[in-house]
Image (spheres, rainbow, N blue to C red):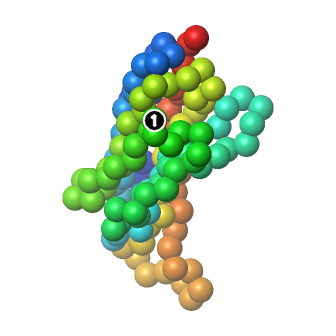
């Protein structure tokens, strides 16, 4: 069993900052990549930022220069530093992990995917 525990969401005024954390635990042998996604009301879930075990990062154009993703491999934890927040950043933010479990995978399966329950970020104007 795997757990992704997210924290750091909340209400902030436009221009403010928040830092999200997501700690993975459970039957994990290793984590390939972790990422943050968000879903605003009436919209599809979208990738915000992702980071590989080697530290390579990617992020959505809408958050470049404002959001930074980082990772502590020893703690299986990923962070999302969000600065210069805008009202359009309001959404539920979900953590995702692409990982290898401690049990062997079946043929043709190379990793598993797990989602956190989400944390609300609300930016007021």
Q: In this view, does 97 lie to the left or right of 24?
A: right
107 vs 73, nearest the viewer: 73
Residue 74 on image: x %, y %:
22, 58
The residue depicted at 60 percent of the width and 20 percent of the height is 87
Farthest-out residue, front = 65
The residue at the point 35 percent across, 58 percent down is 26
- Residue 108's place in the image compared with 91, above or below, is below
| Nearer-the-camera pick, 2 or 97 | 97
Residue denoted by label 1: 66
Tell me where residue 21 sits by quadrant: top left
Residue 108 in percent (x, y) is at 59, 86
Q: In which quarter of the image is the C terminus?
A: top right
Residue 7, given in percent of the width and then of the height, sits at: 39, 33
Residue 7 in view:
no
Badge 1: how crowded within 10 Å, few (<14), some, or many (20+)? Answer: few
Q: Residue at x 49, y 56 (%)?
A: 58
């Amino acid at each position: 069993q795997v757990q992704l525990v997210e924290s750091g969401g909340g209400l902030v005024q436009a221009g403010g900052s928040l830092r999200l954390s997501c700690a993975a635990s459970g039957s994990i042998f290793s984590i390939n990549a972790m990422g943050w996604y968000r879903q605003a009301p009436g919209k599809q879930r979208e990738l915000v930022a992702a980071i590989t075990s080697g530290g390579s990062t990617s992020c959505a154009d809408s958050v470049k220069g404002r959001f930074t993703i980082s990772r502590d491999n020893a703690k299986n934890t990923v962070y999302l530093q969000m600065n210069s927040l805008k009202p359009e950043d309001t959404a539920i933010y979900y953590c995702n992990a692409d990982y290898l479990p401690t049990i062997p995978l079946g043929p043709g399966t190379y990793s598993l995917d797990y989602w956190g329950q989400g944390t609300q970020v609300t930016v007021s104007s």
